[in-house]
């Protein structure tokens, strides 16, 4: 006889009778669902039970990557997605939910000493109940999807830090996770308790007071409990918890706590010199929306294409460790897909991205413009002008372009943070060995922000402490009074400001330790594609595919094939050393791109001093590097 209201689930595993109903006594039999899905890890099952009860979801579903086609059909039927041509999909987020919110993002632990300047530290004992209160009953009527995932190529030495189980009440989040991470129960069944618990509850997006003093959203990483609780958004990094909440915030904390590795908002690419057969790997940090995806996907400029090939490894996250066997730094991309900025993506700026999001790729577009009659998508910079015939076109909010009022006429059709989501395998220049569990040896670590003056095209730094110092003083310019003072950078150390999980002084020390453990260390460099002419504002450097040229110079410098010119802030190429074949730069622009304006740099050094002084316990080696650069500038003045 079937024990009618026994929900413990134990008897079910013994049951040999006919298929059992999913619900008994009106309650979902979640053990039955987990059994059927082969989810056997008892720690995962207990966690699912706990949050199923807390969130009040109606039912659960355990997700494997192979469920993608069915989930897509369901999302299309439910109107959560619309078709965007063959094998491509379109989604619109809630208009108040279009980007990460840094103010509402918190790292919480039980140790007040974990508070840093940027991690918005709060006590875990305060944040967990606060989040669980918000989540209580908030998934009523919904399905709770159980998404086991792995943020690493399987077999990676860092695999122990890479597994997680996201619980989410939103189907489109699941579809994004399937593209951005490796998803399936096999990734967690044998792990015991060592997986990240990542709970995502969307909440009622109409009434969360987003951006007001009464904001209800919270995005919390309980780092020392390896638990992520996000409430109040279903967009990007707020909701795809494997990506930045685990892949960056949790992982950077784990890397520090274990002493083993660094997790950084870095791109990772390979350069093959077909003439010599040598292969180089470059990784590096640029703040959000500053060009990582574009650089990682870049092709060699036409004139250099016969000799060099660029391979894509990763565009947003890299985990780095020193390998004791050969003394080199190895990097992996923990992700499985790319979540790229749509704006300005076109055949000229980024042909590989255009191919990676073409029909048949399964790409999901979010918040671009959409034509419901032709199923076409458009964003600013896809073509020079928007489609001339506006029939059927709606902007990212769903408003018909044809019905725009006079004042709305010039508003962008796509949201500036509109994005595409596609798997790495769709990227035409994906590295053949991108799933190599060991990762690839790193030759150079670069940093780059958007800086309209001062920062040259490239300057190389050969000393470890000076390289780390350079990363810590990375920033992007503030352009409007609202964001800061003109000419003063918004510092974004290593491009990790929004993802920092522990104090900056300890972070710097951990960098020195991990990279310092390598006997064959990467060279550092600072790059800048965004210098402008002070008179007419044009970009001095055309950017995009031409960005390979300064990287080639950097590899030559590392190989001792060029010497460059020593300046107080690093080694800068001489104009002859840069391979500019096939380019026509305006006269004078190259000089400006390679010039160090000493007075302007001295001004910057004063701001840097204030910036670094915020961080107690900054290693003395970093201060020494700062003083050395400052003194060299003073000598030159
Ligand atoms: P996140 O995904 O937010 O971390 O951004 P990202 O760093 O990957 O930035 P992405 O490559 O998506 O570029 C952001 C914007 O900068 C896009 O609109 C690009 O078109 C633009 N951009 C990228 N590279 C260059 C360049 O070399 N020159 C110029 N002028 N613009 C660039
Ligand atoms: C960024 O903002 O740096 C991103 C997008 O890469 S998100 O995943 O939303 O953080
Ligand atoms: Mn990013």
Image (cartoon, grey):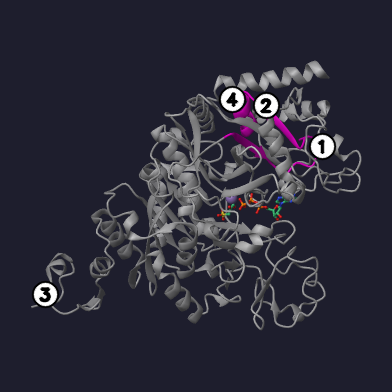
Tell me the quadrant of the picture where the C terminus can be found: top right
Q: Which residue is mark 4?
A: 464
Number of other residues with Cα within 10 Å of mark 1, as a class: few under 14, some 14 to 19, many 20 or more: many
- Determine if the C-beta at disc 1 is less than 8 A from ligand 1: no
Answer left or right for 586 relative to 387. right
Q: Comparing marks 2 and 4, which lies closer to the viewer? A: 4
Of badges 4 and 3, nearer the viewer stands 4
Q: Considering only vertical position in the picture, is 357 above or below 433?
A: below
Name the foreground residue: 15 vs 280.
280
In whole angstroms, how far apart are the C-alphas of marks 2 and 4? 19 Å
Q: Who comes first in sequence, dot 1 or dot 3?
A: 3
Where does residue 9 sit, x and y in percent of width and height? 18, 66
Q: Which residue is mark 2?
A: 609
Question: Residue 37: image x %, image y %?
Answer: 29, 67
How far apart marks 4 and 3 lie (CA) works out to 67 Å
Ligand 1 within 8 Å, label 4 CB:
no
- If you read the primary sequence from the N terminus, does the residue marked by circle 1 or circle 4 appear first? 4
Residue 497 position in % (x across, y down): 58, 42
State the mark number for residue 593: 1
Circle 4 residues within 10 Å: few <14, some 14–19, many ≥20: many
Asked which secondary structure carries label 3, the reply is loop
Is 162 on the left or on the right of 37, as rendered? right
Q: Mark 1–mark 3 contact, CB under 8 Å?
A: no
Q: Which residue is mark 3?
A: 3
Q: Earlier in the sequence, mark 2 or mark 3?
A: 3
Q: Is residue 158 left or right of residue 217?
A: left
Question: Residue 529: which quarter of the image?
Answer: top right
């Amino acid at each position: 006889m079937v024990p009618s209201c026994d929900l413990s689930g134990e008897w079910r595993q013994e049951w040999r009778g006919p298929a059992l109903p999913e619900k008994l006594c009106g309650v979902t039999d979640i053990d039955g669902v987990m059994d059927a899905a082969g989810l056997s890890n008892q720690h995962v099952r207990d966690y699912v039970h706990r949050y199923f009860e807390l969130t009040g979801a109606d039912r659960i579903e355990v997700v494997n990557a192979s469920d993608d086609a069915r989930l897509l059909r369901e999302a299309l039927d439910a109107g959560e997605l619309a078709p965007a041509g063959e094998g491509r999909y379109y989604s619109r987020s809630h208009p108040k939910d279009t980007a990460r919110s840094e103010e509402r993002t918190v790292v919480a632990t039980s140790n007040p000493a974990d508070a840093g300047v940027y991690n918005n530290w709060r006590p875990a004992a305060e944040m967990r109940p606060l989040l669980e209160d918000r989540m209580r009953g908030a998934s009523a009527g919904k399905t709770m999807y159980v998404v086991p995932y792995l943020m690493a190529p399987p077999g990676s030495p860092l695999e122990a830090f890479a597994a997680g189980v996201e619980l989410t009440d939103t189907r489109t989040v699941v579809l994004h996770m399937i593209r951005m991470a490796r998803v399936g129960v096999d990734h967690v069944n044998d792990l015991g308790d060592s997986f990240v618990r990542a709970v995502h509850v969307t909440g009622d997006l109409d009434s969360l007071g987003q951006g007001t003093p009464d904001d209800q959203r919270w995005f919390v990483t309980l780092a020392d409990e390896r638990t992520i609780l996000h409430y109040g958004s279903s967009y990007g990094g707020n909701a795809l918890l494997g990506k930045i909440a685990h892949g960056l915030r949790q992982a950077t904390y784990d890397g520090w706590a274990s002493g083993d590795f660094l997790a950084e908002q870095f791109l990772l690419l390979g350069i093959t010199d077909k003439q010599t057969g040598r292969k180089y790997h470059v990784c590096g940090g640029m703040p959000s929306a500053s060009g990582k995806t574009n650089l990682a996907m870049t092709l060699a400029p036409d004139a250099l294409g016969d000799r060099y090939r660029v391979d894509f490894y990763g565009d947003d996250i890299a985990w780095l460790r020193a390998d004791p066997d050969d003394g080199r730094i190895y990097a992996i991309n923990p992700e499985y897909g790319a979540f790229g900025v749509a704006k300005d993506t076109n055949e000229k700026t980024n042909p590989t991205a255009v191919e990676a999001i073409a029909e048949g790729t399964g790409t999901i577009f979010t918040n671009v413009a959409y034509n419901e009659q032709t199923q076409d998508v458009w964003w600013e910079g896809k073509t020079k002008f928007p489609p001339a015939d506006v029939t059927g076109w709606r902007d990212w909010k769903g408003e018909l372009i044809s019905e725009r009022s006079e004042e709305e006429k010039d508003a962008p059709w796509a949201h500036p943070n509109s994005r595409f989501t596609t798997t790495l395998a769709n990227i035409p220049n994906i590295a053949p060995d991108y799933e190599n569990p060991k990762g690839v040896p790193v030759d150079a670590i670069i940093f780059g922000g958007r800086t309209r003056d001062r920062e040259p095209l490239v300057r190389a730094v050969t000393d470890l402490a000076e390289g780390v110092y350079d990363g810590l003083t990375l920033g992007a310019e503030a352009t409007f009074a609202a964001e800061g003072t003109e000419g003063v950078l918004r510092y974004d150390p290593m491009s990790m400001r929004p993802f920092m999980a522990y104090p900056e002084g300890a972070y710097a020390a951990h960098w020195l330790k991990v990279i310092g453990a390598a006997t064959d260390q990467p060279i550092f460099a600072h790059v800048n594609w965004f210098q402008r002419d002070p008179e007419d504002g044009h970009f001095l450097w055309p950017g995009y595919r031409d960005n390979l040229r300064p990287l080639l110079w950097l590899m030559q410098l590392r190989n001792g094939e060029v010497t460059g010119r020593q300046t107080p802030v690093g080694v800068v190429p001489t104009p002859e050393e840069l391979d500019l074949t096939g380019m026509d730069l305006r006269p004078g622009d190259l000089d400006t791109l390679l010039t160090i304006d000493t007075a302007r740099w001295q001004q910057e050094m004063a701001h840097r001093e204030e910036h670094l002084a915020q961080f107690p316990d900054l290693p003395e080696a970093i201060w020494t590097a700062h003083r050395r650069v400052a003194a060299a500038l003073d000598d030159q003045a």
